[in-house]
Each structure stands twice: as structure tokens, then as C-alpha cells.
Image: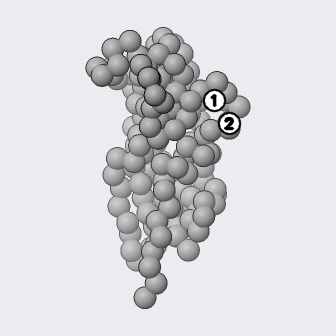
């Protein structure tokens, strides 16, 4: 019996988005940078659920994309750019996994961040399907 090695879905999305020209000047990571107050352009990626389908060898992570900006308009533009980029993940190979599908579970919605009251935040949720080799 072989041991399964699950890919880090958060890091997969972060690595895919980091160098996209659409997100130039935007911090992309799975944790906020030191001193982050929500007023800079940022995309924070967090796995929030999902399930393993053993018989199909599929991991189906649900990922939240929190997008921030200095104002609501900029935060929305960052959300739309991140959204468009993530939907291009299909076919991407990451270690021993291949992204076979990307589905938007919940499109960008305005969601003030009460921990960062100066910030402007949109939240979206996507689901990936990762086939493990």
C-alpha cells in the first residue's frame, strides 16, 4: 500500500498567482505580511474545506480568496483579476497532481474585515479538482 502525498492547494494557487502580470504590485500569499492593515493590494489564499474522493483519486479543496485594496474600487479590481487567473488553473501540474477542473463556488462579494477596519475586502471561494498520481 502506497502512502498518499497531498499537494498543498494553498501554495499551488499562491505560486500560480504570484507572477501574473494582472496582479503586478499585489502581495499574494497564504498569510498576511507583517503589519498588514488591509489597505494594500493583496490576495490571501486559505483552504477552507473540501474532500478526498478515494475511488477517483481526487482531492477537491475549497479555497477562499480574500482580496484587499486601498479603496473599494481597487479591492474589487484585484478580486476580478485574481478570479480570472484562478479560472485558468485547469491543466496545471503541481508536483504529482494535476488540476483537472476549477469551479467558482461563490463569486467575489464585498465583505468588510472587522479585524482590519481600514481595509477594503472582497471574498470569493473556488473549488479545485486535483488528480493525484
Q: Is residue 15 above or below residue 50?
A: above
Q: Position of residue 6 (x, y in %)?
A: 46, 65
- The quadrant in which the N terminus is found is bottom left
Q: Is residue 107 left or right of residue 112?
A: right
Q: Is residue 61 left or right of residue 41?
A: left
- Please report the residue visible at 60 percent of the width from the left and 60 percent of the height from the top: 94
**Is residue 21 visible to the viewer in this orientation of the structure?**
yes
* The image quarter in which residue 50 lies: bottom left
Instruction: Identify the mark at residue 13; answer none if there is no mark.
Output: none
Q: Position of residue 25 (x, y in %)?
A: 64, 24
Which of 25/80 is in front? 25
Q: Residues within 10 Å of mark 2 (few under 14, many from 20)?
A: few
Q: Marks 2 and 1: CB-CB under 8 Å?
A: yes
**Is residue 45 visible to the viewer in this orientation of the structure?**
no
Q: Is residue 119 left or right of residue 82?
A: left
- Please report the residue visible at 68 percent of the width from the left and 38 percent of the height from the top: 19
Mark 2–mark 1 Cα distance, whole angstroms, equals 5 Å
Q: Residues within 10 Å of mark 1 (few under 14, many from 20)?
A: many
- Please report the residue visible at 39 percent of the width from the left and 74 percent of the height from the top: 54
Q: Position of residue 2 (x, y in %)?
A: 46, 84
Q: Position of residue 133 (x, y in %)?
A: 56, 74
Q: Where is mark 2, residue-wise?
A: 20
Instruction: Identify the mark at residue 23; answer none if there is no mark.
Output: 1
Q: Is residue 123 above or below residue 55?
A: above
Helix, strand or loop for disc 2: loop
Q: Residue furthest right?
A: 21
Helix, strand or loop for disc 1: helix
Amino acid at each position: 500500500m502506497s502512502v498518499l502525498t497531498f499537494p498543498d492547494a494553498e501554495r499551488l494557487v499562491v505560486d500560480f498567482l504570484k507572477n501574473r502580470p494582472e496582479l503586478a504590485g499585489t502581495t499574494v500569499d497564504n498569510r498576511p505580511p507583517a503589519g498588514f492593515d488591509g489597505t494594500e493590494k493583496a490576495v490571501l489564499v486559505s483552504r477552507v474545506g473540501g474532500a478526498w474522493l478515494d475511488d477517483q483519486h481526487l482531492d477537491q479543496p475549497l479555497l477562499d480568496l480574500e482580496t484587499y485594496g486601498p479603496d473599494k474600487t481597487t479591492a474589487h479590481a484585484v478580486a476580478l483579476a485574481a478570479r480570472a487567473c484562478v479560472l485558468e488553473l485547469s491543466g496545471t501540474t503541481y508536483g504529482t497532481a494535476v488540476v483537472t477542473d476549477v469551479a467558482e463556488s461563490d463569486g467575489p462579494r464585498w465583505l468588510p474585515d472587522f479585524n482590519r477596519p481600514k481595509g477594503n475586502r472582497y471574498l470569493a471561494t473556488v473549488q479545485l479538482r486535483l488528480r493525484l498520481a
